[in-house]
Amino acid sequence: MHFKTIFKSLKNKDMLKRVLVILGIIVAYRLMAQIPVPMGDAATFKEAVSNLLEKSDFSSFLNLISGGGLASFSIILVGLSPYITGSIVVQLLTKAIPRLEELSNDGETGRRKINQWTRILTVPLAIVQSIAYIFILYQSTIAANVASDFTPTMGDWALSVTAMTAGSMILMWLGELITEQGIGNGISTLIFASIISQLPNTMATLWASLTDTSQGTLNLFGWFELPVNPTTFWIILGFSVAMLFVIYFLVKLNEAQRIITVNYAKRVHGNSSYGGIKSILPIKMIAAGVIPVIFATAFLSLPALVGQVMMSIDPSNEVGASLVSTFSAPSASNFKTMYPDGITGQWFVYPLMYFLLVFAFTYFYTSIIFNTKEIADNLQKQGGFIEGVRPGIQTAEYLNKVVNRLDLFGALALGLVAMLPFITDYIFIALTGAPIGLSISGTGLLIVVTVALENLRSVDSRALMITYDDFGDELESE
């Protein structure tokens, strides 16, 4: 990375404007997270939300990507989840329907139409999810006898659902605004900001636990004592070291790529000759980035939400209870209730499905963003070829073979990273009898590292482009 060039590019008005756009949108986003849903007493529903977060992995994931919007019962409660779900549905249909696949290959015009259909599909999904969450939360308050004096009218329902749907659509618009007017992918940037916004609360909790010396202080080799909790200190130190290793592994994994040399035929036009040069075609091992993890978490967790809706209507509904128990991630909050006799075979169901979905979505999303046939056609039109491979169909087959091999290792590595929190839980269960509950934190760490690298690369590329003329002048002066 050219950090000197990045700082130098901030003198450019366009670059500075793009950075300020991103910062302004993030501030607006965090302000929206503090606006409560107009539905009775917000404090009452916050209590129901806290109970819901302990029971549903989808609720925890939703709270994560909405920057705590669910926990604070704000208008961005459903967050970007409808847009993510809509993207999954549209992309699945694109592969299933030939007409849509042709449209997706029709350049920028086709992609704009598909993006518009994704936006349209996001609206009914946001409405459905808003109704589902309001209904679940209201039923939870009734079951806890904390809202017996409040009965929402149709007007209250309409106002709340409208506010939550509008909040979700505004988030989608802000994400696209960052993509167009800022730097990098806007939706990923908002999810990144959401996860980072949870760090102050986490740090405050850790600090309170670390400074709690009611059980003694830390004695370092008999030399001196530190006024910190010894157990918490060693746990934080161990996890900090482990996190550094994981981040290092994620960075290497994200940067891994296969370099293919492309030769360009020499062409003579009049008295001038063109081509006769070599270029490279880099293919990343994980071209899909963190999208498979986001898709897998959202896709796998939706059945638990359906099960909770069914149980809100009828608490004795066996189908709903089965959906909740099967599609809820093992965590510290539900371990004692779901597994009173310790680890059973059911404990491995969710991690296995999660791994398989991450693996499948890696292949699926890579096939969408890396069209080998289109790349082979473009190389042929430009007079480029891979040594030992004939242009056209054989080049597409060769690229497809390379991508599939990279996807195999990339999907396995990404699935292993996604499994690390569950492996950590299993170790803690064996040692202490209870998991530590890092499933969402592991997903969040993966998202943060990947998005940070992608955005830093985008900033670096734009900075080099902006300062290109200055760089050339420096070379001439030397």
Image (spheres, rainbow, N blue to C red):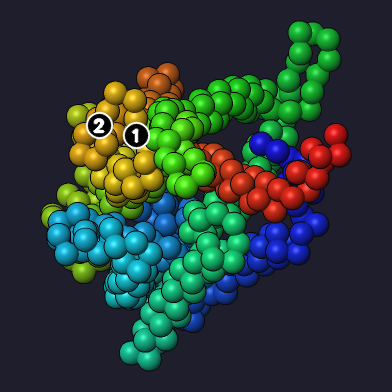
Residue 363's quadrant in the figure?
A: top left
User: Residue at the spot x=42%, y=28% of the render?
Assistant: 261
Q: Number of marks in the image?
A: 2
User: Residue at the spot x=79%, y=23% of the render?
Assistant: 226
- Residue picked out by circle 2: 390
Q: Are marks 1 and 2 in contact (CB under 8 Å)?
A: yes
Q: In the rendered view of the protein, which quadrant contains the C terminus?
A: top right
- Residue picked out by circle 1: 385
Q: In the rendered view of the protein, which quadrant contains the N terminus?
A: top right
Asked if one can make out residue 39 in the rendered structure from this viewpoint, the answer is: no
Residue 86 percent location from the top left of the image: 31, 64
Residue 260's quadrant in the figure?
A: top left
Vertical position of residue 293 compared to residue 153: above or below: above
Asked if one can make out residue 458 in the rendered structure from this viewpoint, the answer is: yes
- The residue lying furthest to the front in this view is 271
Residue 341's quadrant in the figure?
A: top left
Residue 22 percent location from the top left of the image: 64, 62
User: Residue at the spot x=40%, y=21% of the render?
Assistant: 427
Which one is nearer the viewer's eye here, 4 or 178?
4
**Left or right: 307 with respect to 335?**
left
**Left or right: 332 with respect to 26?**
left
Which one is nearer the viewer's eye here, 216 or 255?
255
Residue 450 percent location from the top left of the image: 51, 41
Which one is nearer the viewer's eye here, 172 or 403?
403
Question: What SS does tag 1 mark?
Answer: strand
Which one is nearer the viewer's eye here, 432 or 352?
352
**Left or right: 165 with respect to 404?**
right
